[in-house]
Every structure is written in C-alpha cells, then in structure tokens.
Amino acid sequence: MGWLERVAKLRRWTNNDVRAPHKPLLLLYALGSFQRDADGELEELKRLLEEYGPSHPTTPAYPFHHLVSDGVWEVRTDQGAGSPGSGVRVLRASGATGRLAPELRAALRKEPALLGRLARVLLDFHFPPSLLHTDLCEAVGLELGLAEADGVTGNSTGGRERAVRRQRDRRMRELVLKAYEFQCAFCGYDGMLGTSAVGLEAAHVRWWSYDGPDEVDNGLCLCSLHHKLFDKGVLGLGEGRRILVSQRFVGRSEASRQHVLAFAGRPVIGPQAGSPSVAGQHRQWHAEQVFRGEPREPMTPAYVG
C-alpha cells in the first residue's frame, strides 16, 4: 500500500457518526513539524484539538499513542523508541515526543512533492474547505504552497491520488444557490459582480468529509463569513429552522452584535417553494458534531436595535 492510500485509510474511532479528527490533525501537525525539522509535542496537539476537534472534551493522548499502529508515526521517550501508553500522565512523565515514522520521513526526503499531496488528502477527507484549510495549515505550521510547489515539475502518483479521493458533485453549488435565490440563508447578503454571485457559497450541513451528500437538503447558501462561522460551530440550525448562536462566541463590537449575536433565534431565509429544506438528520449531525456548546437566547428587540 502506497503512502497516499495509507493516509487516506487511517483507522479512526467511529461510534454513531461521532466526528473523530484526532489522527488526521496529528498527522497534519506531524507533516508541518517535518517541514520545520521539529518533533511533535503533546501540548501543541491539545491546543489543535480544542480549536479544530469535536465540540465535546477530548484528549490528545489517544492519537499520540494510537497513530503508531497506522505505520506513519513514531513515539520516543526518555527510555528510547516506543509509546509508554495512551494516558496523558504517563506520556508527560516519560518525556514523550513524536514524529513521522522513519520510512515516511525517508519517502518525503526522496520525493518532496509527496508532502503536499498527503496534506491535501488529509484536508479533503476530514475537513470542510471553508474552514479552514488555510487556517488549519497555519495552525499546524504547514506551508502548503511551498509543499505543493515542490511537485510542479512532475507528479508520478497523481493517478493514485485521484483514485483514493471521493469525487464531489460540481453541480451542488449551483443547485443550492438557486434554491436559496442567491442570498445568504442567515443574513440575506446577495452580492453580484456582473451576472455572477460573489461571496456566496454552498455550505454542507453534514460535512462532505463525513459522508455528507452533495444534495440540496444537505446544503445552505451562506456568505463567506457565515459559512466559516457555521463550520466552526459558532452558528447552527435548531428546531423550526431557527438559527443557533453559540454561548461560547464572544463579540463586543457593534459589527459582532449585528452580524452574529442578533441572529439567535431568527428563522433561516429560504429555500424557495419547491426546494427541500435541510434534512433533519443532517441538521442533527451538525448540532451534535460541530456546534459549540449551548445556544444563546434570542436578543430582545430593544437590545438588537
């Protein structure tokens, strides 16, 4: 099995569609560390999981220990090679650090362009593009543009890379934007540049990387700002097609109040008659796997105004 296939088939803990991006996050961090010639640290992984992981509490020790079994990661302690266990305390006490497996490091030195392709597979398989691909690369210290530039002169494994990627339906954006009459379902923004919509995107409610279908009933037309906030769990969908705003979001400016906080409890705009609304199972997945914490109460009219 080649490296692209191995990374695409990382073994992940699964239970009732629970989102578990622990191993992909650690491997992205490891690729960034390799690019910087540094080892991975448990505390840095903890920070990444808090920002980009599931909404419920989680531990960095799980992927730090278990990614070894996928053949792409190694752990070293004060006593030498090998993970001492999957507990945070034992990993800290042993001075554990991690890095890419020796065979993968050798493959990356031999073929530098492989790093960019591995990163793309991880990003496409496990995280929505709005989110964060750029933000995530910055967070893990990965210069993706530099990594991909290494492969401009040749790509002998491009066919295999395409083979392990699930194909998106390019028609989804057009169908979703039409269903919502080319306006953001949260704020109503409807900007055009000539005859083309600008700043409007088709957001997957259940992420494509977690088997979300390219269907209108799994989509929302959102402006770029609210798409990103939706994928970060600041915004969500509640019962009765009402907008949810996370209590964890803090915004003190008038702009934050007008463009985020004031949306709590408001109805979604659209879709037009004859187009399906977001399916209940997709809304529920987003509420459980992406939305952060508890929703805010709607703001009073006096406060909104």
Image: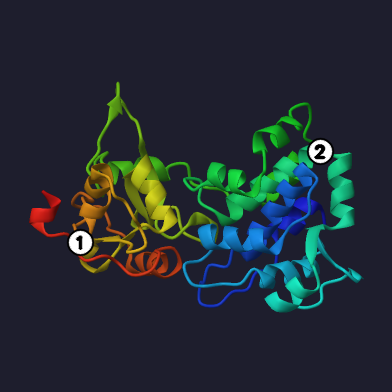
Q: What is the secondary structure assignment of the residue under circle 2?
A: loop
Does 11 sit left or right of 77 as displayed? left
The N terminus lies in which quarter of the figure? Answer: bottom right
Q: Is residue 69 above or below residue 218?
A: below
Q: Nearer the viewer, residue 253 or 284?
A: 253
Give the image quarter of residue 114.
Answer: top right
User: Residue at the location (53% across, 67% down)?
Assistant: 19
Q: Nearer the viewer, residue 223 or 254?
A: 254
Q: Is residue 17 above or below residue 48?
A: below
Circle 2 residue: 112
Does 141 sit left or right of 293 as displayed? right
Instruction: Identify the amino acid type marked 2.
Output: Pro
User: Residue at the location (27% across, 57% down)?
Assistant: 276
Residue 72 seen: no
Q: Are marks 1 and 2 in contact (CB under 8 Å)?
A: no
Mark 2 nearby-residue class (10 Å; few <14, some 14–19, many ≥20): some
Q: Earlier in the sequence, mark 1 or mark 2?
A: 2
What percent of the width, then of the height, locates residue 181? 24, 41
What percent of the width, then of the height, locates residue 8? 69, 57
Does 193 sit left or right of 134 as displayed? left
Q: Is residue 56 above or below residue 2?
A: below
Circle 1 residue: 265
User: Residue at the location (71% across, 41% down)?
Assistant: 116
Q: What is the secondary structure assignment of the residue under circle 1?
A: loop
What percent of the width, then of the height, locates residue 68? 79, 67
Instruction: Identify the amino acid type marked 1.
Output: Gly
What percent of the width, then of the height, locates residue 250? 34, 55
For this orientation, the residue located farthest to the left is: 302
Give the image quarter of residue 192.
Answer: top left
Colour logic: rainbow
Q: CA distance from mark 1 to mark 2?
A: 50 Å
Mark 1 nearby-residue class (10 Å; few <14, some 14–19, many ≥20): many
